[in-house]
Each structure stands twice: as C-alpha cells, then as structure tokens.
Image (tube, grey):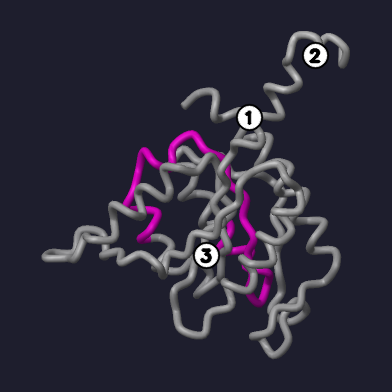
Amino acid sequence: MGFLNKLFGTEHKEEETMANLNIGIILGSTREGRVSPQVGAWVKELADKRGDANYTIIDIADYKLPFLGEAGADNSGVAAWSEAIAKQDGFVFIVQEYNHSITGALKNALDLLREQWNNKAAGIVSYGSVGGARAAEHLRGILGELLVADVRVHPALSLFTDFENGTDFKPKAVQADSVNQMLNQVISWSTALKTIR
C-alpha cells in the first residue's frame, strides 16, 4: 500500500495537510502571578519538536475582552480574538482550577465566540491541587456545546509534584509523554475535522 500511496501522491497530500494545521495553545488565566505562561511554553516546546503542525500560544491576557453582554463595554479586542481563534484548526487549553472550575476569563473568552470554535479538536492540560481535574471536566461540557471535540488523553499537573513552591514549573518526566499522547489525538482529530469545515 505504501508504494501505491507514493505513486498516486496520497501520502504527500496527508503530510501536507498535517503540516498546514494550526493549533492554538490557549492560556486560560489572566491573573497577576499566574503560572500558565510557564506551562504553555513547555507544551509549545514539546509540540514544536514534533513538526506536525504550526503551534501558537494564544494568551487571553493579550486581548482586551469585555464581559459578554456588559452594557457600554469596550469591544475593541473582540475582532482580534475572533480572528486568532478562526485561524486555528485545533487547540490545547492550559487550564487552571479555581473553585472547582475554569477561570472566569476563559469562560468569558469562550462565550464571546461561536462559529469560530465549531468543528475543531482540543486537548486539555490542567493543573491544580488535584491536577485541575474538576476544571477540565467543566471545560469538556462547554466545549461540547461549542462543537469542539475534546480528546481523551489529559495531562493533569499537580501543584504539589510538578511545581516548586507552587510557582516554579518543574514537571515530572512522565508528563511529557502524556502531552505527546494528547497531541497525537489532537492532530488526528484536527485533520479529520478540517474536512468538514
């Protein structure tokens, strides 16, 4: 079958599609002193070594996003946010657990858009005292409503074992394997979902 793929160009086309994928790594916290930039940079470093997509960090804090439905709000950042999300074929959400859920900033950023999220894939990298598991589960419900297909593998980082003093990110070696397994699924699903958009 490999010979036929090479002869008829199928293999090259699949490689080209994967190389053209855009995967946004979304930092889900905007608060002062956050550690999500450290986690996002680590995920991007691992992802870039794969060479299977164009990975970009998308920091919600870089956009001036109003609260959804707020009267007299400054909407100047919404167009740039919409454009950034629309360009992506898939996502990796860096998710912090606040009070058993995701941050208000991430929920608001998700709610501000609709079609730009639709028919794309997502992975979740969470952290918290119990690995951010409860925040990740809440996010899965929101993503389902936005027609985002979230993948099963979920790297869950512990504030006790993957961070020093709760602030310096030093992940255990096993976490890198988990990220790569998640990215395998994100790439496969993003490739498949691109065909229906």
Residue drawn at point x = 28 percent, y = 52 percent = 79
In terms of depth relative to the viewer, which is nearer, 93 or 159?
A: 93
Q: Amino acid at mark 3?
A: Leu
For the residues bearing labels 3 and 1, Cβ distance under 8 angstroms? no
Residue drawn at point x = 82 percent, y = 71 percent = 172
Q: Amino acid at mark 2?
A: Asn
State which mark lies toward you, 3 or 1: 1
Task: Tell me residue 146's x, y (percent).
Answer: 43, 42
State which mark lies toward you, 2 or 3: 2
Task: Tell me residue 73's x, y (percent).
Answer: 17, 65
Q: Quadrant of residue 52?
A: top right
Residue drawn at point x = 61 percent, y = 28 percent = 192
Reply above or below: 114 against 96.
Answer: above
Distance between the alpha carbons at the discs numbered 2 and 3? 39 Å
Q: Say what secondary structure mark 3 lies in.
A: strand
Determine which residue is flagged by label 1.
17
Reply above or below: 126 against 1.
Answer: below
Q: State the count of labels.
A: 3
Q: Amino acid at mark 1?
A: Thr
Determine which residue is flagged by label 2.
5
Q: What is the number of the mark on residue 79?
A: none
